[in-house]
Structure formats: C-alpha cells, structure tokens
Amino acid sequence: MNKTRFHIFFLSLFVILAQAKTEKPNFLVILVDDMGYSDLGCYGGEIDTPNLDGLAENGLRFSQFYNTGRCWPTRASILTGYYAQQVRRDKLPGIKGGGGRSVRPAWAPLVTEYLKQDGYQNYHSGKWHIDGKVLANGFHQSWRVNNQGDFFSAKGNQLNDIPFNAEQATENYYSTTATANHAIECLANHQKDHTGKPFFHYLAFIAPHFPLHAPQDVIQKYKERYLRGWDKVREQRFARQKKIGLINTTLSNLEPKVGPPYVFPDAIKKLGPGEIDRPIPWDQLSGKQKEFQATKMAIHAAMIDIVDREIGRVIKQLKKMKAFENTLILFASDNGASAEIMIRSGGHDPQAPLGSSKSYLCLGPGFSSAGNTPFRRHKTWVHEGGISTPLIAHWPKGIKAKGALRHTPAHVIDIVPTVLKMAGIPKPSSWKNQKIPTAPGKSLVPTFASDVTIQRDHLWWFHDGHRAVRKGDFKLVSAKNESWELYNLKTDRAESKNLVNQKPKLKEKLKNLWNDQVEEFKRLN
C-alpha cells in the first residue's frame, strides 16, 4: 500500500469511527437457515430478492464470508464471537459425550450482555438454538420459534420465554411473516418507549430450512422456473457470479455419488417415485422426478422470496422511525443449502399439495448443489459449499461505498468484535469472576472503508467429523473418515485441484495447525 492510499484508508476509517462515536449505532443482524451461497439475486441467483439486492446495491457484499456449516454452532459463534467448540456448543474430537450442545462457560456471555450494560435495548425474533432462556441472556423482548416442523402453526413457540397460545395466532399464520411482525412490533415499541436509546435486533428466520412450506400462490410464481434442471441453474448462476466479479474460480463438478449426509431410506420410499437422493445429470431423471424436484426448488425459492418481502417490511419500519441511516444491517445464512432428505414432525401426506402443512419435503442434493454454486458439498460438510454464506453489510451513516465487493476471508466469529468496536464498548477481561479468553474474531470495521484483507493467523472448522483449516489462500480439508485434501482458494474455491501430493510440507504444517487448535480448545473444556 503506497503512502497516499495508506493515508486515505486511515482517514476514511477515522471518519467512520468518529461518526459512530457521536451517536451509538443500531444493529440488525439477520440470519436465515439453510440458504445457499448463490440463492440471492445479488449473489447470482434468479430468485426475486429486491430488498436484499437493494441493501447490497447500497452497501457491501463479502465474497469469502464463512459460517460453521451447521445451525447451532453458527448461532453460538455469531453471538459470542468464539468458535462453537470453545464455548461447548459443538463437539471436539476425543472428548466423549460432551461439547455438542452443552451449556456455555460463565465467561462466554452473548454480545447482548455487553450491549445491555451500555444502554442498548436488545430484541430477538425467530429461531434460538442457543443454550439457556432468551431473556436471561441479555435480551429484553423475544419471539422464540420452537416449531420448526410446520411453518403454518405457532404451536410450541414462546413469547418472552412463556409458551404462546397458538390459538391466538392469525388465521393465515406463516412463521416467516409472524417473525417479521414481532420484529416490527419491537421496533415500533422501541421508538415509543426508548427514544434516544440504541438497539440490537437479532432477527433469525427459520426459512428456507425444511420442511419446505410456503403459500401456494408464491410457489406458483416459481412453478415453471426450475424445470430447466439443476445443471442449467448452476451454469447460469455461475455465469452471473463471474460477470459481477464475485468469485475467481471454476465451477465445481456435480458429485453424483454424494447424497444426503444422513441416510433415511424409509423417507425416500414414502416421498414416492419423484424423489431422488443423488445429484445425477438432469437429463437422466424421469418426467416425474423432474417435476417433483423442480417443485421442491420452487418452494425453496418461494420461502426466500417471502423472507425478502418481510425484510422489506422491517426496513420500512426502520425508515419510518428514522433509524435506517444509523443501523448496521448484516445479513447471512447459518450454513450452506442442505442435501438432507428426511420426514419429521407430522409426517408427509403424498396426497397433500406440495408445500402445504401436511407435506414434508427437503431440498435434497440436486438443487442444494445449485444453491451452493459454485462450490462443492452442502450443509454439515466443511468444504466450501457447506460453510460459505453471503454477507451483506449496509450502514448509510458509516459505509459510503455502494455496491462494492469485499474479498477478505471472514467468519461469523467476526460479528461480535465488529459490533463492540462500532458501539465503542471495550470487552472486559473477566465475566462472573472468570477470566475471558482471547476471542479469535476480528473487527470488520476496516473493510467498511476499503477492500482490505483482515489480518489473522487462520480460520478453523470441525463439525460431525468433517475438518478444515484455512491459512492465507490455502485450505486443508477432509470429509469425515476421509483423507486430507489441500486447495489454493485464490483460484480454486471449487476445490477441484487437490495439491496434497504436490505440497506435502504445507499439508503437514496445516494439519499440525488444525491439531494444535483442537488441543487448545480442549483446555477450555
């Protein structure tokens, strides 16, 4: 970086931080569930997402942002700033029976605890999947969607940690809309009761997680769109991604031998002749299979379409209360699109309209591969398809770039340090009489001014036996019970050219780094 650019960068950063200091910023962290990297229009997709596309057009898109590959570990990381394994929210190898979804150590509060002490009002709407009750973790209001098996029922949900009477739900109840309604209500009450106070809102939609449920009129909008097949959808999305400069890689190959991560053969039978559990070439499918698979993708698209509409309503409320300009909106997905195929909850009625409450459908590996374009694998794996997510950052008061891309590798562990930096809150050295270990995340605030690379030693993953570590441009990764693979992500995020035999010393170095991190995390448990 030359002297002129150096001075411009730090001047821009100073201006951003100075603006944030004069008036505490608000935060709206939006998380969706099981959405693929390429599903949004602004990431190459064909689904109608004008509101999110608008945030991207007037803010930033991160091209190399990562989650943990699964729902509950990502939620632990996004709200604590630690890897889930550090706070007992995902398993570590070699620890029998513990760590999966255990109680966080006392030194690991959610970011809301720090914000609350600084005068922030904290709100939660949607999925929880974190240990403990919501209000006991620094939130002031909560709509907790426990019903993840039926988007058309509020049964089992909680309002401020108290069971909600589902009979009070509206006649046309739909989970995504109800979640946005609660968010809008919280924001409206904030304006009325807490004028002048900043807020943090964690808006966690269940969609587009299975079961694939959506109103029939929205499904109908996409009914014909996916009959072209997953091969063609992947090619078209990849072409758009290349055109906008989002990625620098080849398109990964479909993996016809890789099906769902967990096998439920009875579910395949119950779902009928249209179901298929492998991403084989589209032209090899029967007519029934093509129609069934295209309809599943149409429902997935409808769910994302509705999420976008509801986010538009939340944005409208922010503008109405004149909070939009000083609210950092962050949007991401908790993992990649899902290859899972199963039947839970109320089961699946083959005679019911697909996408209705009596049906139970999952996206499956074919269109999941399209959702994760241009990457390999799916949710639960830690290949790029499982852990890559869009990240949109929008903050009119502090982000002056419009429609810009940011290419630094970053991770959900970076959200907490970003929020604390912007809020001007120094992290304490201890909590509840326990020393707080150094967190691995880095503030993303410097990227708001320019496309800089956040300096860090490495990024690390482990879930369900899948392992990975990234240092610089090189990533060492292995699927469960399989050998290590080595890729140069600078040009090969498709993970197609395995360099493990060409660079044995680098492989050993990264393997040792991965193992050292495991041992360090074990000491915290």
Image (tube, rainbow, N blue to C red):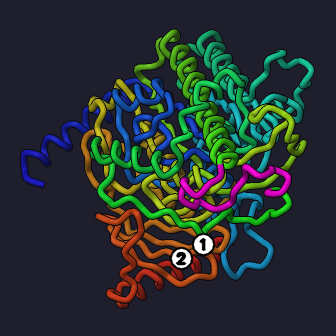
Q: Position of residue 390 (x, y in %)?
A: 46, 45
Q: Say which mark, if any, is on residue 466.
A: 1
Residue at 52%, 14% in the rendered image? 316
User: Which span is picked out in magenta?
Assistant: 268-286
Is residue 491 shown left or right of residue 390? Answer: left
Query: In the picture shown, does residue 4 fall above or below 492?
Result: above
The C terminus lies in quadrant: bottom right
How many numbered tags mark residues here? 2
Disc 1 to disc 2, C-alpha distance: 6 Å
Q: Position of residue 325 (x, y in %)?
A: 40, 20
**Quadrant in the picture for residue 307:** top right
Query: In the picture shown, does residue 118 fall above or below 76?
Result: above
| Crowdedness near tag 2: few (<14), some (14–19) or many (≥20) residues, C-alpha within 10 Å | some
Q: Which kind of residue does numbered mark 1 sit on?
A: His
Q: Residue at label 2?
A: 478
Residue at 48%, 13% in the rendered image? 319
Query: In the picture shown, does residue 48 fall above or below 258?
Result: above
Q: Position of residue 482 (x, y in %)?
A: 58, 82
Is residue 94 shown left or right of residue 221? Answer: right
Residue at 42%, 42% in the rendered image? 421
